[in-house]
Amino acid sequence: MIEQLQLQPTTKDLKKDIAYFLRNYCYGKENAIRMKKLARRFNISTRELRDLRRKILLEDGIPVGSTTKGYYFPKDDNEIMEIARYYENLGIKAFAIWRKLLSIIENKYQRNIV
């Protein structure tokens, strides 16, 4: 699946250029590149890079993983599943936080009524 992605260098599309770079130079977790270094490579801020990473996945369907060592292009389905599990866990945590905040508001509202 991953091997079939046809990415071209210097497409004038920053998202695809980043994906191409990762696919060719940061293939697999063991070859991850630090976020700051990758941002400097493309002359963008780390915030822009995080936004582009999200868009690369959501808009272009190209997986980009991250570890404490940086960003990488997953080399196999196992690495893609690790990325998926990370987002699943993140979603569960975000939902739990949302529920807690909602309950705080509800409790505050109920105390004011009584």
Image (spheres, rainbow, N blue to C red):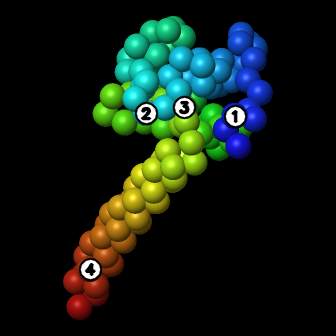
- Taking the spot 43% from the left edge, 24% from the top edge, the residue there is 31
| Residue highlighted by disc 1 | 3
Q: Is residue 61 above or below residue 109?
A: above
- Disc on the earlier residue, 4 or 3: 3
- Taking the spot 68% from the left edge, 23% from the top edge, the residue there is 16
Name the amino acid, label 4: Asn
- Image depth: mark 1 or mark 4 in front: 1
- Point out residue 80 in the picture as x, y percentages from the top left corner: 54, 47
- Disc on the earlier residue, 2 or 4: 2
Whether residue 24 can be seen here: yes
| Residue highlighted by disc 4 | 107
- Image depth: mark 2 or mark 4 in front: 2
Name the amino acid, label 3: Phe
Q: Secondary structure at mark 2?
A: helix
- Disc on the earlier residue, 3 or 1: 1
Q: Residues within 10 Å of mark 3 (few under 14, many from 20)?
A: many
- Disc on the earlier residue, 1 or 4: 1
What is the quadrant of the C terminus in the image? bottom left
| Residue highlighted by disc 3 | 73
Residue 89 placement, left or right of 62? left
- Disc on the earlier residue, 2 or 1: 1
- Point out residue 71 in the picture as x, y percentages from the top left corner: 45, 29
Q: Which mark is residue 29?
A: 2
Q: Residues within 10 Å of mark 1 (few under 14, many from 20)?
A: few
